[in-house]
Amino acid sequence: MRLQDKVVIITGGAGGIATGMAMAMAKEGAILALVDINEEAGQKVLAKVHEYSPQSIYFNGDLFDVANLPNIVTTVVEKFGKLDVLVNNAHASTQKPFEELTQEDFDLSFGTGFYPTFYLMKAALPYLKETQGSIINFASGAGLAGQPTQAAYAAAKEAIRGITRVAANEWGKYNININLISPIAKSPGVEAWAKQFPEMYQDSLSRIPLGRWGEPEEDIGRVAVFLASEDARYITGQTIMVDGGSVQLR
């Protein structure tokens, strides 16, 4: 039970990779606050989580509403008395060739990914100081490798990587560790991308040395458990590639 009684916020908690992380963390004793705008799907995930973590809750929150983002953190702290881990997982984007992208495409990507990450990190800081807690943000091989049709997504992900490194350097004095996971995993987003760009999907699969897409719980979730646990206390500012070897950083 590596996360026994740790209070964890996970954004985008209604499906995909977040479900895998939620299950992996719940099985290790975490108390979860799943944040999403899709209440029906979020409640279904919560029902599964309750088998292992009956105190966990679902929080209906629109991440576009930046003025309300601090309320997510304070509500969780008021209910559970503390915050140990913030997982900024949520992100929506459109896939288009570069020349077809619009301001609205970038607004969607930054509005659901970068800005919520930034504002939730700021809101969580006072409480993470108290617990010497952790933040897990999400990067993407789309940004690291320059994946075609992913410019809006890649831009926001690389912006998240930038502020993560800065915060890791600034907040290390509080014993807060902040890292990024860059995953490849089976998710609704990947499935939609595969249908829209099947040749690109097959090409990407062929470039994964381990020869398969990651499993949200067994592959991505277990790494999230590690980064949220005491075992990762001396790791900060790092991009952890959980992608079967498809991007190998130098």
Image (spheres, helix red, strand yellow):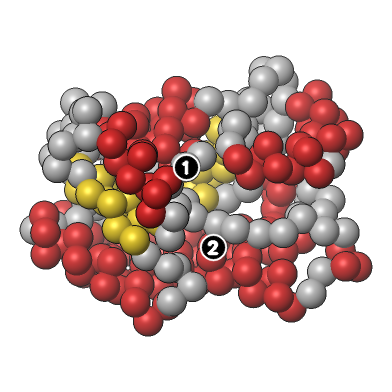
Q: Is residue 21 left or right of residue 142?
A: left
Q: Nearer the viewer, residue 50 or 74?
A: 50
Relative to the observer, which residue lies in front, 158 or 214?
A: 214
Q: From the viewer's perspective, is residue 219 above or below residue 147?
A: above
Give the Cα separation between the discs numbered 2 and 1. 16 Å
Q: Quadrant of residue 107?
A: bottom right
Q: How many residues crowd mark 1 within 10 Å: few (<14), some (14–19), many (20+)?
A: many
Residue where numbered disc 1 is placed: 15
Query: Which residue occupies the extreme top position in the image?
Result: 211
- Determine the residue located farthest toward the left in the rendered image: 81
Q: Earlier in the sequence, mark 2 or mark 1?
A: 1
Residue 113 appears in view: yes
- The residue lying toward the viewer, choosing from 108 and 245, is 108
Q: Are marks 2 and 1 in contact (CB under 8 Å)?
A: no
Quadrant of the rendering where the N terminus is positioned: top left
Q: 20 left or right of 157?
A: left
Q: Amino acid at mark 1?
A: Gly
Question: Residue 146, how many percent across, how many down?
Answer: 78, 51
Q: Going 43% across and 76% down the picture, which residue do you hit?
A: 65
The residue that label 2 is drawn on is 113
Q: Can residue 137 be seen at all in this image of the molecule?
A: no
Task: Measuring from the top left, give residue 205's x and y in whole percent.
Answer: 76, 27
Q: Secondary structure at mark 2?
A: helix
Who's the residue at 21% across and 28% down the image? 52
Residue at the bottom extreme of this rendering: 67
Give coordinates of residue 229: x percent, y percent: 27, 37
Q: Work out whether 203 lies above or below 11.
A: above
Quadrant in which the C terminus appears:
top right
State the residue at coordinates (49%, 31%). 216
Residue 139: give its label: none
